[in-house]
Amino acid sequence: MIKKIDHIAIAVTDLDEEIKRYRDVLGLEFHGAEVVADQKVKVAFFSVGDVHIELTAPTEEDSPVGKFISKRGAGIHHIAYEVDDIGAQIKDFQAKDIKMIDSEPRIGAGNCKIVFAHPKSFSGVLVELKQK
Ligand code: ZN
């Protein structure tokens, strides 16, 4: 079952510049940044209410986020929903003919289990499922 929106991820090219914008212009609470080696990105975390904003910048051009930016430019990259049982949610999506990018959970930022569903199944929006 989907519980809530966990985060909205935004692909950016200059992470330091965008951190300043989100922290100093929008005034969002900044929770630090970390490199997610598996995804070849550096991610900065903010919160607004109980929703997080993740600014994600590629550490290598040849990474999923790097390719996204070269194809579509910077902008909203994905929406992540928190689920209580990621395995059950994957099965539910597959039963409803949702195209999955991952069929098995992998480890994302903050040591959470994550999977991605294909944007083709959600009007061009990349959807992440996340279990804490
Ligand atoms: Zn995410």
Image (cartoon, helix red, strand yellow):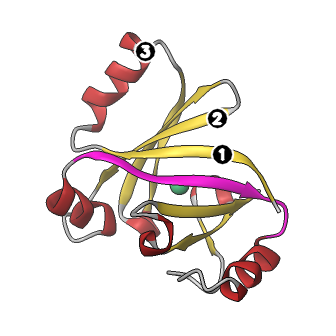
In terms of image quadrants, where is residue 59? bottom left
SS at badge 2 = strand
Residue 69: image x %, image y %? Answer: 21, 56
Magenta segment includes 77: yes
Tell me which residue sits at (36%, 27%) in the image.
19
Tag 1: amino acid: Asp
Q: Residue furthest toward the left?
A: 70
The CA span between labels 1 and 3 is: 19 Å
The CA span between labels 1 and 2 is: 5 Å
Residue range (magenta): 74-85
Tell me which residue sits at (47%, 12%) in the image.
27
The answer to whether marks 1 and 3 mark residues whose Cβ atoms lie closer than 8 Å is no
**Mark 1 vs mark 2: which is more N-terminal?**
1
Estimate how packed mark 2 is, as few (under 14), some (14 to 19) or many (20 or more) residues with alpha carbons within 10 Å.
Answer: some
Q: Which residue is mark 2?
A: 51
Estimate how packed mark 1 is, as few (under 14), some (14 to 19) or many (20 or more) residues with alpha carbons within 10 Å.
Answer: many
- Kindly identify which numbered label has been placed on residue 26: 3
Tell me which residue sits at (46%, 47%) in the image.
9
SS at badge 3 = loop
On screen, 20 above or below 87? above
The answer to whether marks 1 and 2 mark residues whose Cβ atoms lie closer than 8 Å is yes
Q: Is residue 63 left or right of residue 61?
A: right
Disc 1 residue lies near ligand 1 with CB under 8 A: yes
Residue 120: image x %, image y %? Answer: 42, 74
Q: Which residue is mark 1?
A: 6
Residue 10: image x %, image y %? Answer: 39, 44
